[in-house]
Image (cartoon, rainbow, N blue to C red):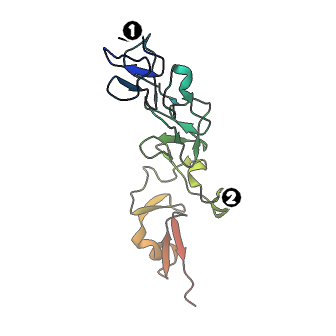
Amino acid sequence: TCKYCDKGYVCYAGSETSNPNDNVEGYICPVGHYCDPEISTTEIECPVGTHNPSTQGESTADCLPCALGYYQSLTGQSTCKECGTGSTTMDTGSTDCSCIGNFRVWKSEANTCKCIEGYTSVPTIYEIFAASQEYDSLDCAPSICSPACASDEYCDFSSAKCKKTSDCSQDACGGGAASFDTTMQQCMCTDEA
């Protein structure tokens, strides 16, 4: 019987080969792992911030750090995740992303950057054009309306009060035709002429 298993393999007790690949006597080390029989008799997960896209990993050197702009918060993975819009990583081997815009926090569950409490992002037309729709990378500013408005409300900058989006035409256009622009977060008067 084999008394020693090669690195990059997992050998079952009684295996007659040091590099089994039949799942009867053992198997090739799977992706996301490395196999070193001097450390463990089973595969070892690559640590957070790394990945191993190949089988037959032999050591932690086979666990590659995630590239800039990518992260991995789980162990034993074959790939890294790309940071979402408005975020990046500060170094290779990251376990999370950092926001580009000021006064933002990265939300791992959505992989996006949101304004911190008490701040809001109300981009100007120029910022929307310049950012090419990447609003999550813009700086957040202190909320004029505090507390922040509900989802069916908007902040009326002239009064610094939250108002219902359904009241948009009365407030902004003197009762004339208007619509609420969700991108600009304000009432927009429409010309009916």
Where residue 193 sits in the image (x, y, percent)? 58, 91
Where residue 109 sits in the image (x, y, percent)? 41, 43
Pointer 2 local density, CA inside 10 Å: few below 14, some 14–19, many at least 20: few
Residue lying at 48% horizontally and 35% vertically, measured from the top left: 78
Among the 4 quarters of the image, the one containing residue 16: top left
Answer with mark 2 or mark 1, whichever residue precedes in sequence.
1
The image's mark for residue 193 is: none
Looking at the rendered structure, the secondary structure element under dot 2 is: helix
Q: Which of 128 and 119 is in front in this view?
A: 128
The image's mark for residue 130 is: 2
Residue lying at 39% horizontally and 21% vertically, measured from the top left: 10
Q: Which of 127 and 86 is in front in this view?
A: 86
Which residue lies most toward the bottom here? 193
Left or right side of 117 for 68: right
Q: In which quarter of the image is the N terminus?
A: top left
Residue lying at 68% horizontally and 58% vertically, measured from the top left: 130
Residue lying at 47% horizontally and 72% vertically, measured from the top left: 171
Q: Comparing marks 2 and 1, which lies closer to the viewer?
A: 1
Q: Is residue 58 above or below residue 66?
A: above
Q: Is residue 143 above or below residue 89?
A: below
Q: In this view, does 133 lie above or below 142?
A: below
The amino acid type of the residue labelled 1 equals: Lys
Residue at mark 2 to residue at mark 1: CA–CA distance: 65 Å
Disc count in the image?
Answer: 2
The image's mark for residue 3 is: 1
Where residue 68 sits in the image (x, y, percent)? 62, 36
Where residue 2 sits in the image (x, y, percent)? 38, 11
The amino acid type of the residue labelled 2 equals: Ala
Looking at the rendered structure, the secondary structure element under dot 1 is: loop
